[in-house]
Amino acid sequence: MDLGGARTIRALQLAFVDHQSDLFLNDSTVYTRFRVLASPDGSRWTTIADLSGETRDRANPYIELPEPVRARWVRYDHIRSATPNLAISDIRVFGNGDGAPPPTPADLRVRRDDDPRNAFLAWRPVPGVVGYNILWGIAPGKLYQTY
């Protein structure tokens, strides 16, 4: 996976799916083993996550790295799965880019619905932004819900 430039990687998450697995067991034989490697240049690789000894069934393993890693390339090396077909629906790389974060959108408007459980939000879009995280909760210091 090419991250498009050197980035600081802090965590990874993989999503394995059942593709023609014909596996209906949930026992000690059901697990996936793999490694994840990273490279600054596509030729020198370092293992950043080693689950080659994994014995648990983890359909969506989340791996927080002990230390941040700087890399442009990320590679998955498969070792073992209980199913005849390896199927990965998603590989997520969590970390930080090098640029400044975009500004908070201006002109936030909230309109309550007739149903008090609903609210409609609108704001002035920030140029170049592809998504927004909306946090809410029961008090300003308790914004534990997100969309």
Image: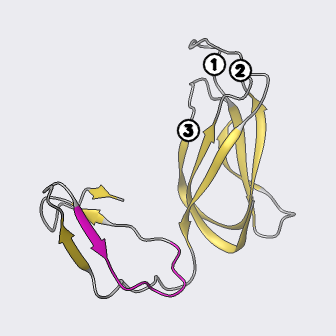
Q: Badges 1 and 2: C-beta atoms under 8 Å apart?
A: yes
Q: Which residue is found at the position 67% from the left and 15% from the top? A: 23
Report the Cα–Cα distance between label 1 and label 2.
Answer: 5 Å
Q: Residues within 10 Å of mark 1 (few under 14, many from 20)?
A: some
| Magenta region | 119-130
Report the Cα–Cα distance between label 3 and label 2.
Answer: 15 Å
- Is residue 93 at all visible to an observer of this figure? yes
The C terminus, quarter of image:
bottom left
- Could you tell me the amino acid type at mark 2? Ala
Residue position marked by numbered label 3 in the rendering: 60
Q: Residues within 10 Å of mark 3 (few under 14, many from 20)?
A: some
Along the line of sight, which residue is nearer the eye, 138 or 62? 138
Residue position marked by numbered label 1 in the rendering: 30
Image side of residue 17 versus residue 86, left or right: left
- Please determine whether, in this image, residue 104 is positioned above or below residue 22: below
State which quadrant residue 110 falls in: bottom left
